[in-house]
Image (cartoon, coloured by chain):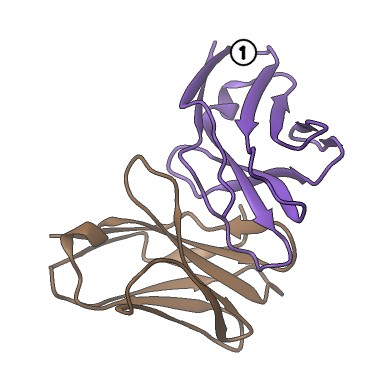
Amino acid sequence: ETGVTQSPTHLIKTRGQQVTLRCSSQSGHNTVSWYQQALGQGPQFIFQYYREEENGRGNFPPRFSGLQFPNYSSELNVNALELDDSALYLCASSLQTEAFFGQGTRLTVV
Amino acid sequence: DAKTTQPNSMESNEEEPVHLPCNHSTISGTDYIHWYRQLPSQGPEYVIHGLTSNVNNRMASLAIAEDRKSSTLILHRATLRDAAVYYCILRDDNAGNMLTFGGGTRLMVKP
């Protein structure tokens, strides 16, 4: 139990639709990161938010966007969904060194 | 980003020690060595990290080579619950919290 909760746990969307995934970070953690994990691969960094501002981004197109709220919870938004967006989306919160991951949202795009 | 190289998979017997190797020949002076593991159907979990000296915690030990070009994660007595994918990651702690995961090592533990 890491204290990081993600919702929903599973989601099915149609190609071209938009999706919003949510993350509630561990209490007091001011940094949240999002990762995409395709089946059989390691997680890939999407972006990171620190005190409500994006302060790092991986190799993902602009249709992947995010928000961090004053209580440090976060959202990941993906527009114009593609079949290759099907993956496990992981949120991680941190204060210093150790990152605490949620159990992820499994997104399937059909 | 400096890269790490790990074996794709390893096997161990329950209650025996496990040594998981990681090569990182292009490590820079400010890179910390982090280990995370991912149990089936769960998000990654922090295991241990270090810079130059060997480190111990309740989960594992981290042995770092003198030239820092390799490291070994040591599980002192493997249990069935330790079956997971283990990721060795280099992170410049001055450059934010981004973690660059590779393919990791899938550890299988036999009863």
Q: Amino acid at mark 1?
A: Glu
Q: x, y (%) of residue A52?
A: 58, 86
Give the residue drawn at x 67%, y 67%: B95
Element at label 1: loop
Q: Quadrant of the N terminus of chain B?
A: bottom right
The part of the image, by quadrant, that contains residue B48 is: top right
Give the residue drawn at x 70%, y 45%: B33
Left-right relation of A104 to B55: left
Q: Is residue B41 above or below residue B92?
A: above
Chain A: give its colour. Answer: brown
Residue behind mark 1? B14
Q: x, y (%) of residue A40?
A: 35, 39
Left-right relation of B33 to B36: right
Q: Residues within 10 Å of mark 1 (few under 14, many from 20)?
A: some
Left-right relation of B108 to B53: left
Give the residue drawn at x 50%, y 36%: B104
Letter of the purple chain:
B
